[in-house]
Image: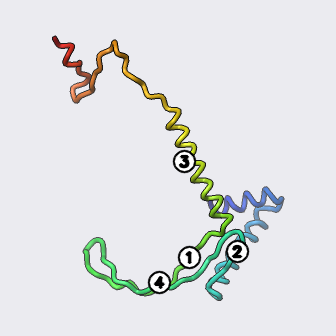
């Protein structure tokens, strides 16, 4: 989903223009970024926690040449989802597993007809059962 799609959905739900909604959404994102820069952490109840963490310097390898390279320390943003989000995402996985199980259980496996000899497909097309050649 894109920011534009988020704006459209929200504007339809609350009855604001897309222009005004876009401004609100952008201000929200800007506030999150500004808080991360100034304080290093922002907690949004029932959503999750964004946090700035420092990654230590390390040695790595250039995948093309295999040469060792130094990767300097850097700051990254991490996100830990809140309980409500984790629960909803977990339910997606459970629903998917249940639908896959239902599909697997409903598939009918065809048994070959005992009166029809089996055929195999080879590089040269179908071949007959060797028992039939006599």
Label drawn at residue 55 = 4
Label drawn at residue 78 = 1
Q: Where is residue 32, by image quadrant? A: bottom right
Q: Which residue in the structure is indicated by mark 2? A: 44
Q: Nearer the viewer, mark 3 or mark 4?
A: 3
CA distance separating discs 2 and 3: 30 Å
Picture layout, residue 45 above or below residue 129: below
CA distance separating discs 4 and 1: 11 Å
Q: Of callouts 3 and 4, which one flags the residue occurring earlier in the amino acid sequence?
A: 4
Counting from the top left corner in percent of width and height, residue 16 is at 82, 62
Mark 2: few/some/many CA within 10 Å (<14, 14-19, 20+): few
Nearest the eye: 90 or 63: 90
68 sits to left or right of 17: left
Q: Residue at x 53, y 42 (%)?
A: 101
- Does dot 2 land on a helix, a strand or a loop? strand
73 sits to left or right of 42: left
Q: Which residue in the structure is indicated by mark 3? A: 97
- Does dot 4 land on a helix, a strand or a loop? strand
User: What is the basis of the colouring in this image?
Assistant: rainbow
Q: Of callouts 1 and 2, which one flags the residue occurring earlier in the amino acid sequence?
A: 2
Counting from the top left corner in percent of width and height, residue 29 is at 68, 74
CA distance separating discs 3 and 4: 36 Å
CA distance separating discs 2 and 4: 24 Å
Counting from the top left corner in percent of width and height, residue 23 is at 75, 71
């Amino acid at each position: 989903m894109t920011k534009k799609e988020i704006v459209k959905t929200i504007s339809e739900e609350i009855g604001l223009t897309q222009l005004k909604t876009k401004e609100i959404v952008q201000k929200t994102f800007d506030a999150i970024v500004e808080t991360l820069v100034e304080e290093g952490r922002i907690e949004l109840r029932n959503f999750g926690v964004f946090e700035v963490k420092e990654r230590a310097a390390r040695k790595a390898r250039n995948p093309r040449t295999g040469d060792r390279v130094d990767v300097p320390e850097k700051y990254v943003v991490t996100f830990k989802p809140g309980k409500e989000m984790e629960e909803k995402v977990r339910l997606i996985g459970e629903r998917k597993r249940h639908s896959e199980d239902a599909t697997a259980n409903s598939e009918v496996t065809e048994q070959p007809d005992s009166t029809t000899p089996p055929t195999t497909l080879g590089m040269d097309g179908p071949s007959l059962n060797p028992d039939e050649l006599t």
